Amino acid sequence: MKKTKRFLWDTIVLTAAALLMRTVGVSFNVYLTNQLGAAGIGLFQLVMTVFSMAITFASSGIRLATTRLVVDAVSKDGADVKKVLRRCLLSILLVACVVAVLLYGSADLISLHWLFDVRTARPLRMLAFSLPFIAMSAALSGYFTAIRRAGAYAGVQVLEQLVRVAATAFFLHMLSNRGLEASCMAIVLGSCLSDLSSFLASYLLSRWTIHQQRKQHNEMPHLTRRLLRIAVPDAVGAWMRSILLTIEHLLIPIGFKKSGISSENALATYGTIHAMTLPVLLFPSCILNSLASLLVPEIAEYHALRQTKQIDAIINRVLYAALLFSLLVAGIFYAYAGELSVAIYHNEDTRPFLQLLSILVPVMYLDMAVDGMLKGLDQQLSSMRYNIIDSGLCVVLVYFLIPRYSVKGYIITLFASEILNFYLSLRRLIQVSTLRLHWKRILKPILCMAGAVLGVRLVATLLPAPLSGSVAWLVGAIMMTLCVYLLVLRCSDCITQRDIRWFVQIFRPERRQNALLSKKSSG
């Protein structure tokens, strides 16, 4: 129970930090949208599409490899963690420097022949300088996850976001009157400063935590081979997916133009979906992102010690909790899409996309949890294969559907790719564990969600006109939906008395738990 408490508290801390960062991020995204407009955001998204691919090439695989190797060093090999971390940092620094040089040298070529916009060359060259810091920060993130110091690293992430916002706002103020390219450069400069600050803070924190740990002087056997065995499959899969994803994102505006939309409207539509709708839909997923990242070392440790019962217990409990949470989020987005769009962006441009894509929320959220479990079970090869299949399907569908069906074609692409990836990942998890699907445990929560959301929505619409549609009304409706949903789940035994006792026991003070155990044993 002590280990479960630590795991849950780490999840809460990471989630709180992620919620804070995403709140700041979404708010800042609204600010950027107002400053640059939809076309400016679309231009920035084009730059970030290529840069995201560069980040993938520079850092993929190292976070997972560092986490797994440090877990093995502490729990199984008794090896020197400092040497393991140093090897990971130096390895990824070499890779990142090579990628940075390539990006810097090919920026003009990319802007002319890939992005078809010369304004993207300078931002790409500037972003190349931050690649080594991003890559080494990924390795340090894996280290903090492995030693269960998520709370400390969450502070680093908050610092990074605050520096990004402050620096970008400053540079935008200085350069905003010089056109879209200068505004894009302002965002890039803020991003570079935040990446540097994040690396410096996490590196200093890692030095302190290593000094606090019990010294172990054993050498980890076959360290480089084990590093490559974990990192390479994860990296290759990420590289392939990133290449295909970049091709997909470059084809999207081109496809919109072929469907009859003008160049500016194509960028605006692309920006509305990718820079405005998807960040809002994925905002609550920070809870599952935190959970998925922490599941890797937990399951990896049990997997190394061959403790299958503990693994199965984690998988069943976490997946069911993820299902209940994702259904609630999907219902809220579907029922209150218009109000959320107005509250966040002061218009209803994102309403149809929020409502339609909310149906995908359970699939996307559950896939995050399943992915973390597979990586903890040493199934990165399977994850790589599924990601490549998913991205390849996206490219094919985007190429053929968007020119013919415009936005509808892209929505079909999103549904097909997300459902396929989740199906393949879940099937693999069932194969390597004792997980079994019970349709009753899936259908009952869906009915509970539908009843809670529709009931509260109906009652909320009966309120007086001055209150209806306000931010206070929206917050109240969402909180009421949450309460009714939990009540219906309890009444239908989707949440049992045993689940409640388990949850309460986690937060009970240690001395209180020990006293209860002593009382039971003496009785």
Image: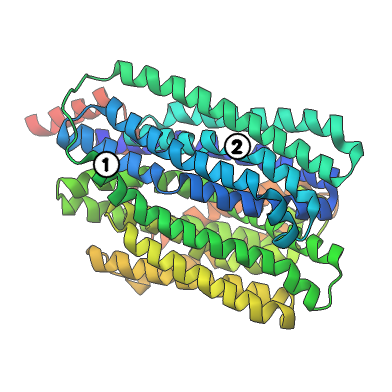
Secondary structure at badge 2 equals helix
Q: Nearer the viewer, mark 2 or mark 1?
A: 1
Task: Farthest residue to the left: give it.
Answer: 522
Q: Quarter of the image holding residue 374?
A: bottom left
Q: Residue 270, image x and y in percent? A: 74, 62
Secondary structure at badge 1 equals helix
- Note whether 452 is above or below 402 in the view shown: above
Q: Residue 29, image x and y in percent? A: 73, 44
Q: Quadrant of the N terminus?
A: top left
Q: Residue 461, image x and y in percent? A: 75, 60
Residue position for label 1: 224
Residue 488 visible at all: no
Describe residue 293's horizontal placement relative to residue 245 as left or right: left
Amino acid under label 2?
Met
Of marks 2 and 1, which one's residue comes earlier in the chain?
Answer: 2
Residue position for label 2: 21
Q: Quarter of the image holding residue 271?
A: bottom right
- Note whether 6 is above or below 448 in the view shown: above
Q: CA distance from mark 2 to mark 1?
A: 35 Å
Amino acid under label 1?
Thr
Please tell me which residue is depicted at 65% across the width and 50% down the height of the picture: 106
Q: Residue 169, image x and y in percent? A: 78, 31
Residue 104 visible at all: yes
Q: What crowding class fits label 2: few (fewer than 14 Cα within 10 Å), some (14-19), or many (20 or more)?
A: many
Please tell me which residue is depicted at 75% across the width and 50% down the height of the picture: 120
